[in-house]
Amino acid sequence: MKTLTKEQKTKPRTRRLRKKLRVGEFQEFGFTISFRFDSQQYNLDQALDHWIEFVEAQGWGFAGGGKEGSDILSGYLVRFKRGTLNDADRELAQQWLDSQPGFACIQCTELSDAWHGPWTEC
């Protein structure tokens, strides 16, 4: 989907079009998360499987992963079906990571627009 500028997001539109573009009251939020896992306790696939079990149990979607030989996983979390994540969801993810043996949350960013950015250029 095309990235909308701030002016385009606030432009007056019909309810139907706002819903289709996911702007206004239909805006959806997610956040970026990075965490470290204990490479003595988990390999990359095991750590990712353990994390994905938690994410799917919450009804969320995770786009991301890690590099072979690294002990860091990172990605973007969103609600799997239509809807938005909130600050309570962010806290829940951080608390779950911190409560799991062998996992530690490194960074959990503020909520951002899941459809229109802001995205960093690669």
Image (spheres, helix red, strand yellow):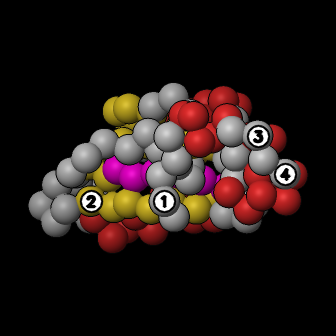
Q: Nearer the viewer, mark 3 or mark 2?
A: 3
Q: Nearer the viewer, mark 4 or mark 2?
A: 4
Mark 3 touching mark 2, by CB under 8 A? no
Residue 120 picture location, percent across and down: 31, 42
Of residues 70 and 83, the one nearer the viewer is 83
Q: Earlier in the sequence, mark 2 or mark 1?
A: 1
Marks 4 and 2 sit apart, C-alpha to C-alpha, by 41 Å
Residues rendered magenta in the picture: 74-79
Query: Badge 4: how crowded within 10 Å, few (<14), some, or many (20+)?
Result: few
* Amino acid type, callout 3: Pro
Residue 39 picture location, percent across and down: 23, 54
Q: Earlier in the sequence, mark 4 or mark 2?
A: 4
Tell me: 67 left or right of 57: left
Mark 4 touching mark 2, by CB under 8 A? no
Q: Magenta stretch containing residue 1, yes or no?
A: no
Query: Badge 2: how crowded within 10 Å, few (<14), some, or many (20+)?
Result: some
Residue at the spot of label 2 = 66
> Could you say whether the residue bearing mark 2 is in a helix, strand or loop?
strand
Q: Quadrant of residue 60?
A: bottom right
Q: Quadrant of residue 16?
A: bottom right
Query: Badge 3: how crowded within 10 Å, few (<14), some, or many (20+)?
Result: few
Of residues 102 and 122, the one nearer the viewer is 122
Q: Earlier in the sequence, mark 1 or mark 3?
A: 1
Residue at the spot of label 4 = 14
